[in-house]
Image (cartoon, helix red, strand yellow):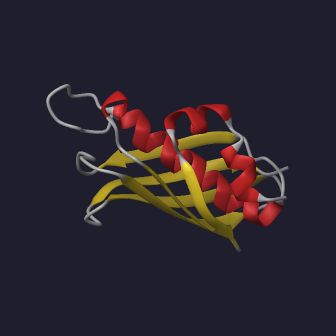
Amino acid sequence: MDVEAFFEGMPFADFLGVEVTAAEDGHAEGHIEMRQELSWNSDKLMAHGGVAFTLADTVGGAALVSLVDQPVPTIDMRIDYLKAGTGDLYAEANVVRCGSSVGVVDVMVTDESENEVASVRGVYKTG
């Protein structure tokens, strides 16, 4: 399965502009270009929490898909917001566990200055 192409074809992620840039061996990276439509603040570009969440969910899923070679529906996600995302956002995901029925992935979302924006743990169905 071409992981990057699979996620590029996901309508919601495509609508938001999520781009998965790398996905192999249980590791994935991606980003989203910040724009006014994704901001919760009309005076300053500040990413809505759902933007960081969707980026983390998509990139986390890509990390796991790179191992199981099939779609992995999200079971649960825990996100801790650490800082407002004021520019483009980047995510890096690493699989913690890839079981026959459940996989666990840790994702870090950062801004363009490499400040941590959110820390995420996702649980996905693998089988």
> Residue 88 versus residue 48: which sits nearer the camera?
88
Residue 87 at x, y percent in the picture: 28, 50
**Image spot of residue 39 (x, y percent):** 30, 32
Q: Quadrant of residue 104?
A: bottom right
Q: Is residue 16 left or right of residue 123?
A: left
Q: Is residue 64 left or right of residue 37?
A: right
Instruction: Please indicate whether residue 33 sits to the left or right of residue 66 in the image.
Output: left
- Residue ranking furthest to the bottom: 25
Q: Residue at x 70, y 59 (%)?
A: 64
Q: Which image quadrant: the N terminus?
A: bottom right
Question: Please, is residue 41 above or below residue 122 in the view?
Answer: above
Q: What x and y, as percent, mark residue 106?
A: 52, 61
Q: Nearer the viewer, residue 58 or 82?
A: 58
Count of numbered circles in the view = 0
Q: Is residue 25 above or below residue 86?
A: below
What residue is drawn where x is 42% and y is 34%? 50
Residue at the far top: name it. 42
Q: Residue at 35% across / 48% down in the picture?
A: 80
Residue 17 horizontal/vertical position (percent): 51, 41
Residue situated in front as seen by the camera: 49 or 90: 90
The residue under the point 41% across, 44% down is: 52
Question: Vertical placement of 13 versus 119: above or below?
Answer: above
| Camera-nearest residue between 2 and 64 | 2
